[in-house]
Image: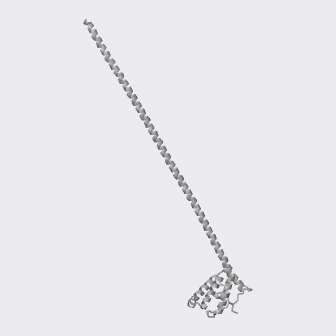
Amino acid sequence: METKSLYTILGVRPDASIDQIESAYAELLHQLKDGTEANPGGDDRIRLIAAKEAYAVLSNSAARQQYNQKLFAPQTFDSQPEIIYEESNSWSIPKLFVIGFFLIGAIWVYNDNVAEREKLRIEHVKELENNLIKLQNEAQNKQEAAQQTQLDRQQELQKAAQENALRENTLRESRETDYRLQQLAQQEAHEKQMQQQREEAQRRQQKIDAERQIEKEKQVVRWLQNENQSQRNNYGYR
């Protein structure tokens, strides 16, 4: 009895590996490509649809396992049924329609829930990845903001320290200038006072010298007067 299955559509055995399934699917697509373009409404187009549906189930490990359980039940996988590989010209439109109907039902049964769960899983993973990226970006932004705030604070402290040091230097220089001006003023006052004292002493000395000179001159005059008086007395002058 001729057995039709997804494996016969791709031309592989039920124990074929995923690489063999992909290779058979690619080869079948290549074979049907020219026929699809030349006769889009013929058997090749139906076979192409059937091949795509078969590959969608057999390339998914979960869907393929469920399909094998129904395909070979109540038989075991080890007691594989004999599969008859038909030539391309044995494919008739009624058979292909039956296979297509069978494939659509099988895909709806085996792949709908799996695809929906996979879609939800992918969306959940993407959401988690987006949330993780968002959290990482927020953490990075907060860290950068904290670093920038700390840098700005350090710069403000450095600027304040520099301004404080500048003010202290200016104040110290002002105090030193005032102290030097005060010392100069005191020195000038002291020198002026000493100059006045020297001038006053010089004037007193000059006055004393003048008084002594006058006194000497007076003494000389008195001596001369005494001498004249003595000579007059000696010569009898009255």
Is 127 drawn above or below residue 27 in the view shown?
above
Image quarter of residue 43: bottom right
- In front here: 17 or 58? 58
Question: What colouring does the structure picture have?
Answer: one colour
Q: Quick one: which residue is furthest to the top in this view?
A: 236
Q: Position of residue 177 (x, y in %)?
A: 45, 41
Q: Is residue 77 visible?
A: no
Image quarter of residue 133: bottom right
Residue name at image x 50 percent, y 50 percent: 163
Q: Position of residue 204 (x, y in %)?
A: 37, 24
Is 232 drawn above or below residue 126 in the view shown?
above
Q: Is residue 221 visible?
A: yes
Residue name at image x 34 percent, y 19 percent: 212
Residue name at image x 48 percent, y 45 percent: 170
Q: Quick one: which residue is furthest to the front in this view?
A: 41
- In front here: 60 or 84? 60
Residue name at image x 50 percent, y 48 percent: 165
Q: Quadrant of the C terminus?
A: top left
Q: Position of residue 235 (x, y in %)?
A: 25, 7
- In front here: 210 or 73? 210
Number of marks drawn? 0
Image quarter of residue 181: top left
Q: Is residue 54 left or right of residue 187?
A: right
Q: Quadrant of the N terminus?
A: bottom right
Q: Position of residue 174 (x, y in %)?
A: 47, 43
Is 192 drawn above or below residue 161 in the view shown?
above
